Image (tube, rainbow, N blue to C red):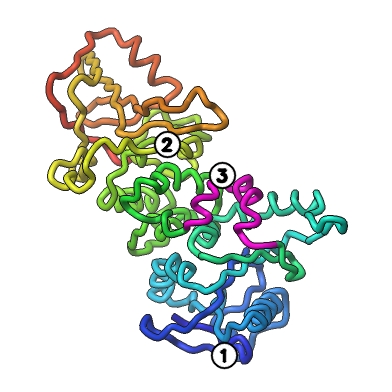
Amino acid sequence: MRLLQTETLQFKEFFDTNIPKYAILSHRWDQDEVSFKQMRKGQAPEGLGLTKLRNFCLQARTDGYEWAWMDTCCIDQKSSAELSEAINSMFRWYRNAERCYVYLADVNERLVEDDRSFHPRTRTEILASSWFRRGWTLQELLAPQEIIFYDAQWRSLGDKYGLHPLIEEATGIAPIYLHQPDRCCKTYDRKGPSAATKMSWAARRETSRSEDMAYCLLGLFDINMPLLYGEGGAKAFRRLQTEIISKQVDESIFAWKFVFDPRPRYAGILAPHPRFFIDSDTVIPNYNYDLRSLGNDPRYWMTNKGLAMKCPAGVSLKIAQDFAMISNPLNCRIGPCRISPERSDSDVRIIISKFDGKCYRVRDSESVEDFYNLDSAAQDPADDKIIYFALEP
């Protein structure tokens, strides 16, 4: 790990066994950010980027930190190997930092003098800050134990515990996950968020490169995988889901809906983007099984024919010539929902179409009507059936 000395602004390399205490910065990139090459050669141009770096190091040094880390200059962006290692280590680096400083360049603090509360305009600016809309800042919010927010003039706005009502409103993330960050990425923590819930946190976020919508979620799911810029965002996101499926037992990963794009009626079993989980924030697994025993009898697994899934006995199946539709329940349900209480505790199921020997997801708004209007006999298989899903349309 390459750290920056907060007084001299000189770099030093550290390995895992001797990394000192350090502060870390979370921010939105500007156009004139200083690079590793510029800093190493002492040629960093004057501008907003260098000013931000100096102010960050000054604040860290004032708070007693000799070492600091900032992504713009502590990673050699020209080295694909170093960039890949950094992205796969990013969640851990933020989690291990003694303190994280969040710099909100688009917020200016205004205080109401009588009770030191925020001016209404400041509150509006915080909620509208672009920092809450970027993909990479999701893990930077969840991983650190201690976070202090600063406005454009480096005035403290408060920590993430004191600001959690605003943060929850801006992100939809429950305070328990802000207060207990280690719970967010544990594989089998029944008190932790489901895969669908984590995906919903990223649903409204954006990244400059399409593949980064998958790569920015690696740490949140405790996944490591190679970076393949140029593969496209949908392919990278499906690759991430494949890794999640191979490591975690949580069928909420399939609990997404068709949104935003009205064109495709059919899709593979894996979502093409986190935004398809935008309504999945309250989906939770049904923990009515022993997680440790599932390795001997999994309900779904990857094959060279696609994703294989057991269709439980008693599941409705309708067949018409070479076409079939299956109403397949997932082993998850909709948990407590404050916005739509009527949705709470309802089962989650997906409608599947099978044709030409492959199974596909069907658009939700049409699938239920199609299923019940299909002119064929309904079958309820007495035994489990194995169906094979296409991963993409």
The answer to whether one can see residue 149 in this image is yes
Residue 93 horizontal/vertical position (percent): 46, 71
> Quick one: 238 or 224, which is closer to the camera?
224
Residue 160 horizontal/vertical position (percent): 61, 59
Secondary element at image label 3: loop
Q: Which residue is mark 3?
A: 172
Secondary element at image label 1: loop
- The amino acid marked with disc number 3 is Gly
Q: Is residue 184 above or below residue 368?
A: below
Which numbered marker is on residue 283? Answer: 2
**Relative side of 278 to 44, left or right:** left
The N terminus lies in which quarter of the figure? Answer: bottom left
Residue 46 horizontal/vertical position (percent): 72, 82
Kindly identify the residue that appears in the image at 15 percent across and 28 percent down.
385
Distance Cα–Cα, label 2 vs label 3: 14 Å
Q: Which residue is the extreme one toward the right? A: 114
The answer to whether one can see residue 393 in this image is no
Secondary element at image label 2: strand
Q: Which comes sooner in the sequence, label 1 or label 2? A: 1
> Magenta region: which residues?
158-180
Asked whether residue 165 is drawn in magenta, I would say yes
Q: Residue 117 falls in which quadrant of the image?
A: bottom right
